[in-house]
């Protein structure tokens, strides 16, 4: 597997800067299928920066849900201990425990052509590892974002920069890809909680 940082550098091609990406606000939506015809595979990048003197380990995860808003099977929960969904449509590029350096800290690849037809949503979350025992929360971050990149052209399509309204949260639902009338739509969520990753598992499992 290509190391996370090495993969990230491949998405920094100068071609990416020839186009203006869309900046979404909380609750904003973007129809990828309609506005990006021919789009097949995207990279979902999550990034963050720490306030000076702080360090914490954030983990990105994806929940592949059916029409009942539940995992279609346990194996469709993609995270650092299960890097690939059974249908091969979602792949986590690996855990980054430091968050040091520029660019995306963790990345998830999504192939629209191979996704199980029973999948209606891909929910992307970030949770702080051992947040309670270490007294860590999102208030220790300066910036956090989620972005969508066309894998084929390496072009950033859209970005959502999280605001600082949830400083005490230990996990955050960054955004979701949702199928609407057969078309894939990205929605910026930005809703946090304080139950850890297990809290999302309790909701979606």
Image (spheres, rainbow, N blue to C red):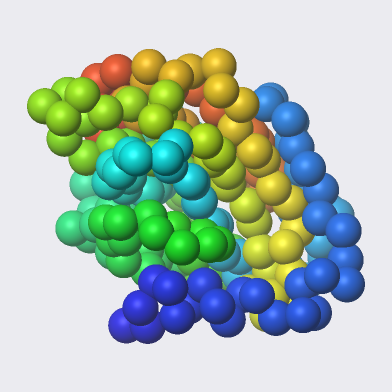
Count the numbered circles shown. 0
Is residue 155 at all visible to an observer of this figure?
yes
> Is residue 122 placed above or below 87 in the rendered structure?
above
Locate the N terminus by quadrant.
Answer: bottom left
Instruction: Kindly indicate the quadrant of the structure image that contains residue 138.
Output: top left
Q: Residue at x 65, y 75 (%)?
A: 12
Q: Residue at x 61, y 70 (%)?
A: 41
**Horizontal side of residue 153 vs 176, given as left or right:** right
Residue 137 image position (x, y, % from top left): 33, 26
In this orientation, which residue lies closer to the viewer: 83 or 98?
A: 98
Residue 171 image position (x, y, % from top left): 35, 29
Q: Which residue is drawn at 70% across and 81% down?
A: 13
Is residue 181 at all visible to an observer of this figure?
no
> Is residue 137 placed above or below 123 in the rendered structure?
above
In this orientation, which residue lies closer to the viewer: 62 or 205?
A: 62
Q: Which residue is drawn at 11% across and 27% down?
A: 133
Q: Quick one: which residue is furthest to the left in this view?
A: 133
Residue 21 image position (x, y, % from top left): 81, 55
């Amino acid at each position: 597997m290509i190391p996370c940082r090495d993969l990230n550098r491949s998405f920094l091609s100068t071609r990416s800067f020839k186009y203006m990406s869309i900046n979404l606000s909380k609750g904003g939506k973007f129809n990828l299928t309609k506005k990006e015809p021919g789009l097949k595979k995207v990279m979902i990048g999550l990034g963050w920066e720490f306030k000076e003197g702080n360090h914490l380990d954030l983990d990105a995860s994806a929940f592949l849900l059916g029409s009942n808003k539940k995992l279609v099977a346990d194996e469709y929960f993609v995270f650092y201990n299960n890097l690939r969904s059974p249908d091969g449509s979602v792949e986590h590029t690996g855990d980054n425990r430091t968050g040091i350096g520029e660019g995306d800290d963790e990345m998830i690849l999504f192939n629209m052509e191979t996704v199980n037809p029973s999948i209606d949503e891909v929910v992307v979350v970030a949770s702080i590892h051992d947040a309670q025992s270490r007294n860590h929360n999102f208030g220790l971050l300066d910036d956090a974002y989620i972005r969508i990149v066309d894998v084929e052209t390496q072009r950033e399509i859209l970005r959502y920069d999280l605001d600082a309204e949830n400083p005490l949260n230990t996990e955050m639902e960054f955004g979701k890809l949702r199928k609407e009338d057969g078309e894939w739509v990205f929605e910026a969520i930005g809703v946090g909680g304080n139950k850890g990753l297990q809290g999302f598992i309790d909701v979606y499992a």
